[in-house]
């Protein structure tokens, strides 16, 4: 991925991220000084059939983002603005909200629903339309307004910098052409399970960091929404080779991962999470299910929680006809037996309770007689398994 300014890689990764709600792109807000190429870079992503439509927030009325109320057949409805047709024709592209800190509070309020729910009146943006914004810090913006916390929490925040050396190189060789990376949505969904459980394990130990207040000179802060953003972004970083390996120091090429996590949940929560990531000792859950790694019963309770809940999610997401399912289920149960024999069954109890409550384990026991001996051993530690064996 070729970029020419600090922050460009993070911007492209955010725009190439599929979200759990089915649309593409985590809303991204690029912060940087005037004249450093923020707008030019985003607008350079335009291609045939992939428009970039720029709106200068301060030049628009709130109705340009929420729709204009009109009377139709005796009822008040919101007529969609003309700019929405650009995306209805192509079904994809980037809605670029430039100079966001010049928007007065009334316009910022109108943007709340557009950025989060992707709706303009009764009309929705197509799923492949991304939302990007750019802003100068309010203290140097013309007629600058502070960004409201509700609007700020709807974006991942990226710091943009085009330093003198990078600019000099661009004068010599030109700016590199930027293109959006392609992310496999199915693979992204599978890896999001892993990162979701890592965050759950982290918050199990640090529940106060589920919500934080923005630090001084920062707009990002932790909330359930911004943690969801972080999870999706971390999965994208992993698929494109930017994610650190848990239990190891972050390599140099993991800087976009670090910046995106900070840009989603704020530096305080992100620093604690990254430290937690460095101390983790868990193997890759998919590697355990495939027999390429083993469960270590000496893992901490939160590490076992992450490992087994991720494996549970991977197993329950598989088709019943998948030829790997039987062997994967056996390895999962054998790992659980190892943990239970080490007297750490409490750490994976909720995982088994959910599998039983959903009926998944009963279905697997009925369909695969190979797992019965392992379930019988596990029933010494999990009484609920006895009913499955007797059914």
Image: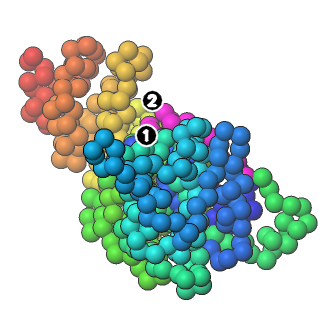
> Which is nearer the eye, 374 or 11?
11
Residue at screen point 8% across, 18% down: 390
Residue 336 got which mark? Answer: none
> How many callouts does the rendering have?
2
> Which is nearer the eye, 226 or 67?
67
Q: Quadrant of residue 93?
A: top right
Quadrant holding the C terminus: top left
Residue 251 visible in the shown view: no
Q: Horizontal and vertical percent for residue 347? A: 22, 48
Q: Which residues are magenta?
A: 178-191
Q: Assign a secondary structure to mark 1.
A: loop
Please say if 76 is above or below 362.
below
Q: Horizontal and vertical percent for residue 108? A: 43, 68
Residue 22 got which mark? Answer: 1
For marks 1 and 2 on the same chain, the one whose residue lies earlier in the sequence: 1
10 Å neighbourhood of mark 1: few (<14), some, or many (≥20)?
few
> Which is nearer the eye, 179 or 293?
179
Residue at screen point 49% across, 51% down: 81
Q: CA distance from mark 1 to mark 2?
A: 29 Å
Residue at screen point 53% across, 54% down: 131
Q: Assign a secondary structure to mark 2.
A: loop
Q: Is residue 2 left or right of residue 234?
A: right
180 in magenta:
yes
Q: Which residue is mark 2?
A: 290
Residue 143 visible in the shown view: yes
Considering every residue shown, the one lying at the far right of the view is 172
Q: Quadrant of residue 168?
A: bottom right
Q: Horizontal and vertical percent for residue 218? A: 47, 77
Q: Horizontal and vertical percent for residue 124? A: 43, 44
Q: Are marks 1 and 2 in contact (CB under 8 Å)?
A: no
Considering every residue shown, the one lying at the far bottom of the view is 139
Residue at screen point 33% across, 26% down: 329
């Amino acid at each position: 991925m070729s970029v020419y300014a600090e922050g460009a890689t993070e911007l492209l990764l955010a725009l190439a991220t599929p979200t759990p709600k089915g649309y593409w792109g985590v809303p991204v807000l690029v912060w940087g000084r005037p004249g450093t190429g923020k707008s030019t870079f985003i607008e350079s992503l335009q291609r045939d059939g992939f428009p970039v439509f720029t709106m200068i927030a301060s030049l628009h009325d709130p109705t340009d983002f929420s729709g204009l109320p009109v009377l139709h057949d005796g009822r008040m409805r919101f007529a969609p603005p003309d700019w929405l047709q650009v995306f209805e024709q192509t079904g994809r592209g980037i809605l670029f909200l430039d100079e966001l800190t010049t928007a007065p509070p009334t316009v910022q309020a109108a943007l709340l629903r557009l950025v989060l729910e992707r709706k303009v009146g009764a009309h929705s943006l197509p799923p492949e339309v991304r939302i990007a914004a750019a802003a100068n810090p309010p203290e140097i913006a013309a007629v600058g307004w502070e960004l409201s916390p509700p609007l700020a929490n709807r974006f991942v925040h990226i710091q943009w910098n085009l330093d003198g050396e990078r600019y000099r190189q661009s004068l010599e060789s030109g700016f590199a052409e930027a293109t959006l990376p392609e992310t496999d949505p199915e693979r992204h969904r599978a890896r999001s399970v892993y990162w979701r459980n890592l965050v759950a394990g982290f918050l199990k130990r640090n529940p106060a960091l589920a919500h934080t207040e923005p630090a001084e000179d920062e707009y990002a802060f932790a909330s359930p929404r911004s943690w969801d953003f972080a999870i999706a972004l971390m999965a994208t970083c992993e698929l494109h080779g930017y994610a650190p390996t848990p239990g190891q120091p972050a390599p140099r090429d993991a800087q976009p991962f670090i910046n995106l996590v900070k840009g989603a949940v704020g530096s305080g929560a992100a620093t604690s999470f990254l430290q937690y990531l460095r101390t983790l000792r868990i193997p890759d859950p998919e590697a355990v299910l495939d027999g390429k790694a083993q469960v270590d019963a000496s893992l901490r309770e939160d590490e076992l929680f992450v490992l087994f809940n991720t494996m549970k999610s991977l197993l329950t997401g598989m088709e019943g006809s998948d030829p790997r399912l039987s062997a994967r289920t056996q390895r999962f149960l054998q790992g659980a037996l190892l943990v239970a024999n080490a007297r750490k069954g409490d750490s994976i109890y909720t995982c088994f309770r959910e599998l039983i409550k959903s009926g998944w384990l009963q279905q697997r026991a009925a369909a695969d007689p190979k797992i019965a001996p392992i379930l019988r051993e596990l029933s010494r530690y999990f009484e609920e398994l006895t009913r499955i064996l007797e059914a």
